[in-house]
Image (cartoon, helix red, strand yellow):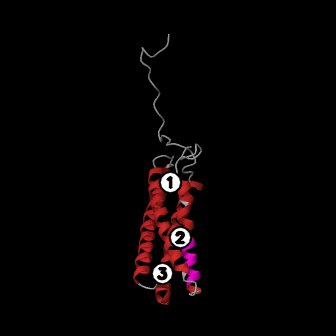
Amino acid sequence: MELIPSWAPNVHPMIVHFPIVLVMLAAAADLVQLLRPSVRALSRTSSWLYSLGALAAGAAFLSGRLAANTVFVPGMAHSLVENHEHWALVSTIGLVLVAAVRIAGGRRMRIAEGRGVRVLLVALGIGVAIMIQQTAERGARLVYEQGVGVIPGPVPTAPESPAVLSLDQASP
């Protein structure tokens, strides 16, 4: 069993959707919990979702760094690759911080009881969800507008010089 299917240039496209979904679900759980404070389990659920999202974002970031060396990147797309990488790093750091605040805050205070704290946590969650969305949008532009990752394997940017055969390699 292969980890990477033959049709996939790398694992990055298979990983990137996890942080997107986890963060959107966490933000939605936070919003529902803000509107329905009696559902206390949602606070813990969203903390778990943000934590899992942070791990998934770290994996997506690292796989993206590795993927950049395995796919053809057209000349016009290099700046967009750097921009996508920057957003991915900032999003991952933001998500790790939100997850850490949720875990540390959940252990030290009762998050579900203070409406101001819940509003702050929802705002942080929406902020990190927007950062993840911006990262995903730039990644989608790389694939669908620039064709990055569509051609498997690195493609040389300049044509190779014709091979010169030595006399002992030439067939008679």
Sequence-wise first label, 3 or 2: 2
Magenta stretch, residue numbers: 25-33
Main secondary structure of the magenta stretch: helix
How far is the residue under mark 2 from the one under mark 1? Answer: 27 Å
Q: Earlier in the sequence, mark 2 or mark 1?
A: 2
Give the numbered dot on residue 23: 2
Q: Which residue is mark 1?
A: 77
**Which percent across, then down, holds residue 102?**
44, 77
Circle 3 is placed at which residue position?
121
**Label 2 residue SS:** helix
Name which of mark 1 and mark 3 comes first in the sequence.
1
Check the picture and name the quadrant holding the N terminus: top right
Residue at image position (40%, 77%) is 104
Q: Position of residue 76 (x, y in %)?
A: 50, 53
Residue at 47% from the left image edge and 69% from the top image edge: 51
User: Is residue 143 magenta-colored?
Assistant: no
Residue 142 in view here: no
Mark 1 residue element: helix
- Tell me the kind of residue under disc 1: Ala
> Where is residue 21 shown, x and y percent of the image?
57, 66
Q: Quadrant of residue 17?
A: bottom right
